Image: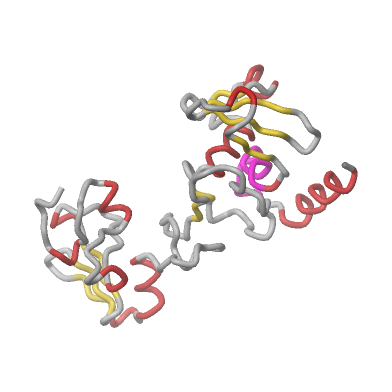
Amino acid sequence: MSTDVSGSLERDLTTDRTDLEQRTRRALKQYLTVLDDIDEAAGADDLYVIISESGSQYCVDARDGSCTCPDAEHRDPEGGCKHVRRVAFAIGAEAIPTAADPDAVDDQLGAHVDGPVRWACEHGREFCAEAPVTREDAIRCSDCEIEAVATPAERVVADGGIIEAGDEGEILDEEDGRPDDCDCGDWNDGIGLPCWPCYREGFESPASAGEEGDR
């Protein structure tokens, strides 16, 4: 027990970032185990049991952001207690912000529940290859791609609402009905699958297909 607490304290002292809210830092860095198959959470949708470093156990309801811990019951902080935030990060309901130090984030975050842990790049995109920590299948978001391959002189803003960066990528603006954060481009050309922002908005094919009525 003393080893775990000391290790957590050392990480807090050496990697603390003031632009992350305190409860968010604790949710990301402390050893908090999220489980969905024991006690109150067993067989219950959106209920999770959190076991802290000290062995304390609490129940989080991801539907309403409630928790049985004293902080939630007596203070009800905006954005939730650290346990509510930990669950959101662990199940992929919230992307880990770019201000988080990847070396300080608990390695076991999300290890015991289903759902991809999401990391945001500096443009707020999820699973971007330029994020601090990425999945193996991550690609650059459109903005990161443009910054990586194009000099200011090579960036062209066309009248049709398309921003191009040489032959490496393009952003399709909402002129074709696509979301502003559309990431369709070379990476999904020819595979017939839309990027996540387009899929989220109901599109079944990538923007490169040029079909506005494919929802």
Q: Residue at x 72, y 44 (%)?
A: 30
Image position of 133 with respect to 71: above or below: below
Q: Is residue 54 shown in magenta?
A: no
Q: In the drawing, does residue 64 fall left or right of residue 151?
A: right
Q: Position of residue 105 (x, y in %)?
A: 66, 53
Placement of the N terminus among the 4 image quadrants: top right
Q: Position of residue 3 (x, y in %)?
A: 88, 48
Q: In the drawing, does residue 204 fall left or right of residue 148?
A: left
List the single residue furthest toward the top: 74
Q: Quadrant of residue 81?
A: top right
Q: Quadrant of residue 58?
A: top right
Image position of 178 with respect to 2: above or below: below
Give the overall secondary structure of the magenta segment.
Answer: helix
Q: How is the image coloured?
A: secondary structure
Image position of 51 with respect to 192: above or below: above
Magenta stretch bounds: 18-28
Q: Residue at x 26, y 81 (%)?
A: 167
Q: Is residue 26 shown in magenta?
A: yes
Mark count = 0
Q: Residue at x 69, y 48 (%)?
A: 29
Q: Residue at x 61, y 46 (%)?
A: 20
Q: In the drawing, does residue 166 fall left or right of residue 80?
A: left
Q: Quadrant of residue 21?
A: top right
List the single residue furthest toward the right: 2
Q: Closer to the camera, 59 or 130? A: 59
Q: Position of residue 203 (x, y in %)?
A: 20, 51
